[in-house]
Image (cartoon, rainbow, N blue to C red):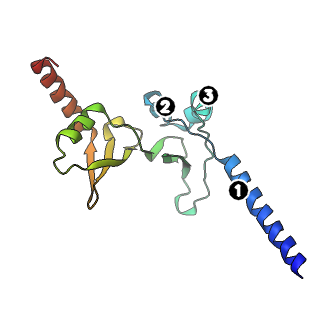
Amino acid sequence: MKSVRSILSLTLLLLFLSANQLYSQETRTLQPLDTQDFECLKTLDCIQSSERLKEKGWSFILDDTVEKFAQELTAKMEGENVSFFAIYNKEGHLVRSVYKRKNISLPPSLLVYLAENNPEGLTLTGTTMTMHNFDESTITYDVVLQNGTSVESKNYDIAFVEELSKYQGLRDLYTGS
């Protein structure tokens, strides 16, 4: 009886390990998207023929099985620190999308701003960039700041970051930095 349990335990362990290995083989590295990719992602024709997206690990399987929205196709992908969700109409045009990247490097002007406006000595512990409809003017940066006792989440839109860049550029010009 003891040997049957041992064999059964070993079999279950091997099944678990092989299932994990299969899953890890399916996971792929998705390289971040950039301005050239955003324009392409607005139409299905471009997505399906783009070698650039394929080279970055982005391949799309479109789901048209959603009964409630029979006239739409959805695409969804998640990778380490990146996620993507988009809906396209049957003609292949973008209806809406959300693209997120976690743990990204913030724009230098935002980093300077956070450093200069941090009287409590908070440490930057997380960042997320979110973009809607592949439109760079909709970018927002979410930052998580914390110290031993408190955690703060702050949100900055791209317009604010661009204003910071202008201000810091003028300040540098004025001070000769």
Residue 51 is tagged as 3
What is the three-letter code of the residue carrying label 3?
Answer: Glu
Locate residue 75 relative to residue 128 in the image: left or right.
right
Q: Which residue is mark 2?
A: 37
- Residue 170: x and y in percent read 14, 23
Distance between mark 2 and mark 3 Cα atoms: 11 Å
Write down the quadrant of residue 19 in the picture: bottom right
Point out the tag, 2 or 3, that comes first from the N-terminus: 2
Q: Nearer the viewer, residue 65 or 139?
A: 139
Which residue position holds label 1? Answer: 20
Compared across the picture, whether 151 is left or right of 126 comes to: left
The mark found on residue 104 in the picture is: none
Q: Name above or below for residue 18 compared with residue 26.
A: below
Task: Establish if 42 lies above or below 71.
Answer: above
Q: How many angstroms separate mark 1 from mark 3 (CA)?
A: 30 Å
Percent x, y of residue 39 = 45, 31
- Tell which residue pokes out farthest to the left in this image: 174
**Labels 1, 3: front one:** 1
